[in-house]
Structures are given as structure tokens and as C-alpha cells.
Amino acid sequence: MIKAILIFNNHGKPRLIRFYQYFAEDMQQQIIRETFHLVSKRDDNVCNFLEGGSLIGGSDYKLIYRHYATLYFVFCVDSSESELGILDLIQVFVETLDKCFENVCELDLIFHMDKVHYILQEVVMGGMVLETNMNEIVAQVELQNRMEKSEVNQVI
Amino acid sequence: MSDVVEKTLTALPGLFESQTGAAKITNRLRQLIKSITELTSKHEEENLIKRELSAIKEQVSSPNTTMKQMREIMVRAMYCEMLGYDASFTYIHAIKLAQQGGVLEKRVGYLAVSLFLNEGHELLLLLVNTVLKDLQSTNLIEVCMALTVVAQVFPKDMIPAVLPLVEDKLSHPKEIIRRKAVLALYKFYLIAPNQVQHIHAKFCKALSDKDPGVMASSLHIYLQLIRESPDSYKDLTGSFVTILKQVLGGKLPVDFNYHSVPAPWLQIQLLRILSLLGKEDQSTSELMYEVLDESLRRAEMNHNITYAILYECVKAVYTIHPKAELLEKAARCIGNFVLSPKINLKYLGLKALTYVVQHDAKLALQHQMTIIECLDHSDFTIKRETLELLFRITNAQNVTVIVEKMLDFLCYVPIKTLTFAPDNSWFIQTMNDVFSIGGDLLQQDDPNNFLRLLAEGKPEEDDQLRLYAVESYLTVLKGHTSHLPQCFLQVMSWVLGEYAHLQESVDRREVIRLLTQLLDQRSVSSETRVWILSALTKIPEGQTDLILDLAESLSSSQDTVLRQQAQELRHLSQDSQLREWVLVENSCAVDSSLSFLDGFVSEALAAGAAPYKPPHQRQEELSLNLEPYSFSLPVSLSSCSITDRQSPTLLSVSSGLSGNSAELSTLILEGVKRVWGKDGYLPQKEATAPPVDEPSAAVQPASQQEAAERIEPRPEPSTQNQDKQQLASSLFVGLGVGSSVSLLGKSEAPPPRFRKKPRPHESSSSSGTSKRSSDSSSRSSRNTTDSFLYGSFPEEEPATSISTFDHTPKSTTANGLSQNKDTKEDRHANTSQILGGDMVIVRPSTIQDKHPPSVSSDLTALLPADLKDLPHSDVISLTSDPSLSLSSCRLFRDEALLLVIFISNCTETVIKDVAVQLTCEELKVCTGNVMDCLEARSTSVCHYALLMDDPHTNVSLTGTVSYQTQPGHTNTLPFSGTLSTADFIRPLVVTTEEYGKLWLSLSHDVKQNLKLLTDAGDPLRTTLNALKDALQLHVVDIIGSEGIVACRLLSGAPCLLHCRVNGAALAMWLRSPHPALPDFILYHCQRALAHH
């Protein structure tokens, strides 16, 4: 199970926060800070896995992360997930974002937080991996986009 | 950064163009984000968000806000929440949006709901009808959204409402809907398994769905189901094998390829399922050998994801019934992982090795050089995993090196490994390192356990160890001390105070000087100063001048405790008669019969404590194992030997690999003549020298000698490499056949030096220094009459218990001083440090209990109707005051302990605003209630559900009742009590087969011989029934002289008990997934039997 998905930038500013297990609001913030602290001090040439911080459940949980330019994508998962599998799932997610936003960058995530959430919902549902096939994910997102466009057209 | 700016400039206009209609609104969001990026301080951010939130508040309550604006507002609210600000006033609007809006509004509304609300939130109830409506919608997107929100946030009790509709969706024509429905059902299964039991057939249909995506999602469910009961799904093995074959054969649409690997995530799931099915089942395993082989062969492309598959494959090969050919291939794969330059793969290789060494230690030997390199790797995660691997292979021969490596790493030494301590000096030296590096980060128990270890030994046997400690500490103190952590200073001062006299050659003035010197240091905390002064008090007389100087200088200290203690010190040093009387020297006549404790002992016995057993009666105990101490349980763990272990896993492994393991023993011989140490290794002993001095070599058959020669020739090691090889040989020493025990982390024969340690229970009466244990045993004995003793203990009882856990044996007898405020404070400092959180002495400040418990027994009639039928304890009076009297009763519900509190109004007037507040650190207090008023002479009932997630021996509860007798005049009445783990144990009803399976899957075990009740015809049955009555266990089966019993902690972790009649004792073996639970259950079993 995926326990949480955190995206923050190189300064620790949260860009997308999605918890699949309940944590109180202030606890969530502490977890983000702790995770940022753990992840940000790691070099780029070390492995992409580390033990979860004490707040999110310690050694029973793994943080699996990827660092893209200005952003960290961190998935917190339990021992039932495959490390390399999740690592590539992050890649799939980012590639999907790239397709949907055309050259995705941090700003897209800031200004379209809701959209990123909708895309994520097609990849992970309630902490379970729903879809790993990028074309399928993009197709679902397109479907929703079309709906949005038709609304705009109506207004005009 | 510049490209980001550029991107902003180009992106922004486009942003508005695409949403012309919403441009103005988007402006607000943009404004918000822009202003946030311009902020310089957290304080400014707070102000800005506060302003933003009040603007949002205004907008949402305005009737003119359109639905579309609402959408945008919701995104802003999400943004604020993401930054950690409370926008809870928008929650209801999120629900409204989902209820009333069109598809787009619903989308935002549902998203906000799933981000904002947790499963327990009451607002979710408002969503049920909307979700039901959307599930039946003809709009695909609406159905999808409803399914998503259901899987995301719906709690247990709301599942029945939506279940039929979600179930219907399994046959929906669109595959995306089917897929989401399958996952939603999986989520339901996870939170409420019994509610979806009836649809297992439909899961099967999903498994054979024509859409591979739907099939893939159904594997989630099957993985879970098979993990829980592999036997029920053996018949599906063929199907899973076929699916995997088809995937491997490229039968899936190309769409499912990822980097030209066919459906990798699907393969991973299937491999996991297969490994679960094939575990310990030869015939099922045979079905999958072929496809596993194929999988290993196929996954040779050079991409991350193929390694993910390989890793699962290797794990599967080692989990199922072994096949030599596959094992060989898998071992080669692990080799590739470990040797890979890619760091992620190296990590997985180490992880695989850690998994595999339990089955086959040979592999670790093959890769010893790589492991050594990983120990010094710059990556923390890699190091950590390597240590984990080393920890698995710790044995008596390599413990020194492994512990040294662990110390290097982060001073994290699982004290358990010290079980193998080879000699005194190494032990003390290692503990010095642990204290000085680990310092105040250590668990509070560690220094205490160490001191107890020193204190509890017999004088003649352990003086050696103490002497060594004294010597070593004097050396440490002579050096630079300002960097030493406080806990180390405390340990040293205690040891010096207590044992400096053992060392004849040491000048006492020198000891005093060294300790005094510490007092002058600024970095020394006042708590440590108290320890040091206590030590100085104990160092015998004759040095009055030094002491007087010291007392003089401290008498002006600002710290009252120190001042007080300095005064005391001065008095003592001047009045030798008082001193003699107060601080009895060890050499003085000691009341070895401990007659002064008779009163205490008989009281404890009357309360049901186990009688003292002399050492020879105690069974063999695990030496230096500190686990039982940390819980203060009167439990001794018998050391498990390999012969006792009946796990089929182990048997099958040893039989299957016997051929290989012979070779193994020859490998280790290399360089093991001498345990490696910093100065202990003898380089002139070459690795290729015939290992004649190794006892095992003598019995080695010739064929194995040959094998040794075959392996031993290596490329000539460079000198730099030689160090590593030495390290390797000392690390992997003892990984041979004979010592396979050590692989399990258990030693058959640790050095006798460290075998002993009385159990806390007995030691409480014999040693005053075992503070914690005596405290707990005096408490536990008190609790035996009823584990839920409420209210205050008779006044003298706390006093007794305090004197037994007082700091030193000498001051224990210092009755004359016990009135001194400062010794009390000293003691307080020590106890709070020594007692864990769950060991707080409850001394309620309430009025004494005036009613005998029996008076209130009819109170159970007042229980609410739905609770009346639950098994319950007697009603106990809690506390009372002139207006109210409180009693309580425990009700044993399956998933919780219900604590019912009866509040009776003893006056003739109405009492208003009665509110009960209950707190407990260790337990989850679930529900509670408040009542408005209490009529004259009436009784009201309130109840709390208590949940215990982690077991504790005894848990203290505290609470207060506040009430008003006259308006504006609030009284409070505090109360407190304790609960024991036994209150939280529930029977676990399983069949013998289920028990067997569960047994094998559990990892933490404890063994112990218990008293057998022999007074009846069938001792085993009588004993088990006694246990069952006392602890609510479930007796699964009794076969001959063996019985199996199961229980669980509420509805949480199970604990299985296996009992065997062994002469006049009952050999009990407990297993549980929870590391501490067996200890607690064993403790309660012991008590129940002793009490019987």
C-alpha cells in the first residue's frame, strides 16, 4: 500500500500532498518537513530508497523518491510494495504529467494543483496502484479535459 | 532558475487564454500564489493566509457566489490546507459542491472531500446519498469519481450502503469502471473483510476478465487472500502460472509494455502470489518451476523494471520448495545485484541476501568482500542494510567485529548481540563506547540495565567485572571529560561510589578529587550533580577535609537540591556515628536472611506474588538478555536451542542443502584461527596454512578438504585488500554447519561468564538496587488480587515500595534521612529516570475509599441494555467525596475494553454539569459521554472504550470528574486506577489447521517452563483450563501431552501458545507477530498459575 505521496521543491515547499492514511493536519506538516529533511540531504548518486521518518512509521515504511530538477517526488510505501516497481511508477507518473502539460515544470504543479490531483487519481486510488499504463492514464485525463472544454465553449 | 522564469512568462498568458471564462477567478488563485512566492518570512505567510481564508469565508457564505466561483474557491482552500492552515469551514461546502453541482463541480467537490476528510469524519454521512446517486449515473466520469471517493475515504460502517452498487459495477461494460470497482472492493475487503465474503465468486470472474487491466487489479485481492490463507487457493496455481506464461510470451497488447517489458507490474504481482502458494508445498512448487525458470531467463534486458521482476523471482525461488537448478540461477542473480555498480540494485542485492541467509548462509560467504565494501559505503541506506545482514549472521565468534562495526556506524548496538560477549574487558570497553558515543540518545533503560548487571552479581563472581569497570572509569575521568554525555557520567559516578573500595590500590582522595572536578564543570547537569554527590556520600570516611571543602563550596549553590545534599554531606562527614548508622559498609554485618523484608514478603505473598526460588531452582536463563528487564516482567527466557525448534522451514532447508553446507565449513576455516581484533590478529598465520588447530578440521572428511583447496586459491591479495580479508574472515567466522544456530540469532553456549542474572521477581527481595523490578513486582503483587485495583493504596504501601526501589542499598536503610526533602528529590529524579512511562506510581490525592466494594455490586443492574450481556468484572469503588461516589466495572468486548464508570449522587440535591474526563497515555480512549445533571440520590453511567495497540504490563489511568453543586462553583474529583494487559486479551478462535499455518508465519517467540497444576487427574487440561479462565484464552486442541491455545490482543495481534507437559512442568512456547506480546502473556500466565 502507498501511504502518502509528497511532492515538494528543493526548498521543501509542498507542491502536492496526498495522504492515503489519516494524519492530523499538523502531523502532516511535520511529516513533510521530516521527509524533506531526510531526502534533501542525500546526494544524487546514492540509492533512491530510505527508511521512513519516525513520524510516518519508521522502518516499517520506505521512502522511495526521485529528484527531478527542482522537484522531489516521494512515495511512502509499506513493505508490500516493490521498491523498483514504485520507482518506475514515479517515472510513469512524471512522464504522464509531462504529456498532459507539455514539458511539465514546477509552475504547472503550482497553478494546476487540482489537475495534478486528477491525474494522480488515475494512477493511484486509495493507496493502491490503479494503472501503470501511461496511454490509459492519458486517455482518462483527456476524457475529463474534453468535458471541461465543452463547458468553456458553452459559456462562449 | 532562469528557465523556470522563462517558462512562467510563456506559460502564464496561455493559462488565461484557455480559460477565458474563468480568467477573473483564476486571477485570485494566481494572486494568492504570486504573493506567497514573494514572502520572506513564515510570519508574513501566516498573515497572508489568514487574510485569504477570511476572504474565502466571506465568499462562500455570500449568496451571490456561483458554482463556478465555488470551484475556484475550493482549489484555493486546498492550497491553504496543503500549506498547513486550517480551512475546515470549507469542508461542508466541498460536500455541497459534490452534492449539487454539475460534473465539473462534483469533480472538485469529491477531490476536496477526499483530501480534507478522514474516514472518521462525520460530514461523510452527508455524502452517502450523493455517492449512491452518482454510482447509478449514466455518466462514466461520475461513476468513476464516486468509486474513487468510496475507495478513498469511506469508513467501515458506510460500506453496506454502497456495496450492492459497487458489486454491480463488476459487470459494467466499461473496463475502467470494472477496474475501479475491483479496487474499491479490495479496499472494502481490507477494512471490513466479512462484508465482502459473499462476492468471492465475482473476484474469480474479475480474474478471468477479458481486459488485462481488470485482471491485474483483481490480483491485488488475490495476493491479500492468499497471504491470509494460501491453502484455500492452491487450485488457482495453474491459472496464475498460465497467466504469467502468457504475459511472458508477449500475448498482451503492446500497450501494456513498459520499456518493451510486457506488463512488468503484473509480473511482479504474479510472482509474489506464486511464491506464497509454493511456500512449503512441493507439489504446488513443481507446477511453477518452469515458469520461474522462464522468468529468470527472460528478464535479462538492462532496465530497472526487469530487475524489479528478477528480484521478485529470486525471492520466489528461495521461498518455494527448493529446486537446486533454480537456486543456482537465483544465486547468480543475487550476485549480479550485489556486484552491480548501480546503487539501487546493490541495495536490493543486500536485501535479497538478508532474506536468503536465513535459508542459505553460503551466499553471504560468497559475497563477503562486497559486503565489507558496503559497510564503508557512503550511502546511509546501504550501510544500514548491510548491518541488518550482519546482524542476521551474528554468532559467538564474530560478535566483537560486528559490534565494532555497528558502533562505528551510529552507535546502534542491539544490546542483544552483547549476549555473546567474550570477556569482561571487552564488555566494559564496549559499553564505554556505547555510552560515550550514544550518550543521551540511548534509551533510558540501557544505563539502568547495565548498572543492574553490575550490581546484581554475586560479590566473589562479579568483583572482577566491577573492578575492571572502576579501573576503566578512573582512566576515563582522568582524561578529557567535558564531552562525555550525562548518562555516562551518571553511570560512572554510581559505579565509583559503589565499588571504588574494591580497588585497594586506588587512593580514595584521588577518586574524590576526580568526582569533585566533575562538579566544577559547567556542562554537567544538575541531575548528574546529584548522582555525583550521592557517590561522594558513599565513599567512606577519612577524607573529611576534602568533603568539608566541597560542602562549603556547594552550600551557596543556587540549586536547592544540591545545597540540601551538601548540608547532608557535611553532617555525615562530621558525625561518624550517624554515618555508620546510615551508610552501612559492605563489610559490616549484613542481615543475610533479609529478615527486615519479611513483612514485605509476606504481604506480597498474600497478595499472590510468586514465592522466591533459589538460583539452582531457576531454569537456565538467557544470559545478558535485557528484554525482560525493560518490561520488568518476572520472566526468564529460556535459551532456545536448535533441537527445540520444530519449524519445518528449518528442517527442509537443512536437509535440502546439506550437500552445500559441507563445503561451507571449509570456507570459513580460512583465517579463523584467531578472532580478529584491532591488535588481536596475527598476520603470520597465513590463510592457506592447514587449519590443524581448528577443532572442526579434525573431523572433516577428506572430500571436504579437497573442496577447501579448490576454493582457497585466490588471486594474491594486495596488502590493502588483506585488511578487508581479515575483516571478512572474522565477520563470517562460524557461519558453518555446526553453528547454523547462530544464524537464528540464538546461541547454544554463550561464554559462561555472562550467564546468570536473577530474574527481576526474585531479585526484588534480595537486592535493593534492582529498582525497577522491585517496583514492578511490588506493584504486580499488589495487583494480583485484582488487576484493576482502583483508588488509593493504604498509606504505608507506597512507602514500602519506594524504599525498595530506592537508589542504593545503603541509603535504603537510611531511615533517619528519609524525611529529608532532598533525598526525596534525589529519589524522585532517579525514579523518574528509571521508571518508564508505564510505570508511574499512582498516588491519588483523593479521599480514601469508604465503601466496601460489595456495597456497590448491584450497580451492574444499571448497565445499558446493550452492554448487560457482556462478560464483566466486579464493580469496584473508585473514589468518593461528600457529594459524589464513583465506582467502575470492566466489560470485555471483543474489540475493546469497556470501562464503565458509575457516578452516584450521595446528596439530596441535584448536581449539575457532571463531566468525566479520562486520560491514559498508553491506551486509546475512544468514546465517552457527558451528562448535564444528576438527580439527588441517583446514579448515572458513562462508559469508555479503551483500545490497546501495544501491550504494556499495567497501564495507569487517571481522570477527573468535574461537577457543580451550586451554580458557578465547580468541584473536581480526581480518580485513578490501573489496568493490566490481561484485560485486553481475547480468545482467538481458530482451527488446528489454521493454528498450524499461523504458527509458521509468526516470527517472535518466547519459551518458558511454567508450573503444572498437578492436583487433578489430567494436569494439562486442568492447567489449560485455569489459564483459560484467568486470561480468556481459546484452547484450540489438546493432543496427548500437548495442547495448543490461541489468543489475541483485542482484535489485533494474535499470540499462539504451544504447551507440552515436560515432567512436572509445562513447557510453554509462545509466538506472535508482535515482539513484546508473548512476554506479557507469559507473565500473566505465570501469575495466573501461581495464583491458582
Image (spheres, coloured by chain):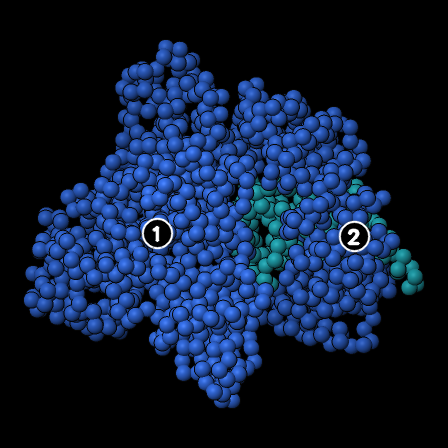
Looking at the picture, how far across and down is residue A98, in whole percent? 75, 47
Q: Earlier in the sequence, mark 1 or mark 2?
A: 2
Crowd band around label 1 with a 10 angstrom C-alpha radius: few (<14), some (14–19), many (20+):
few
Chain of the residue that carries numbered disc 2 in the rendered image: B
The residue to which callout 2 is attached is B165
Q: According to the rendering, which colour does chain B have? A: blue
Amino acid type for the residue under numbered disc 2 = Leu
Image position of B654 with respect to B517: above or below: above
Residue B199 spot, x, y in % from top left? 73, 44
Is residue B513 visible in the rendered image? The answer is: no
Horizontal side of A41 relative to B192 (left or right) equals left
Q: What amino acid is labelled 1 in the image?
A: His
Q: Share a chain, discs 1 and 2?
A: yes
* Percent position of residue B991, x then y: 55, 40
Residue at 22% across / 50% down in the picture?
Answer: B455
Distance from the alpha carbon under mark 1 to that under mark 2: 55 Å
Question: Which mark is drawn over residue B943?
Answer: none
Helix, strand or loop at disc 1?
Answer: loop
Residue projecting furthest to the front: B1017
Q: Is residue B614 left or right of residue B57?
A: left
- Which residue is label 1 attached to? B1092
Place residue B697 in its image quadrant: top left
Location of residue B336 with respect to B999 vertically, above or below: above
Vertical order, B448 against B344 (above or below): below
Q: B90 or B930, which lies in front?
A: B930
Chain in cyan, by letter, is A
Q: Chain of mark 1?
A: B
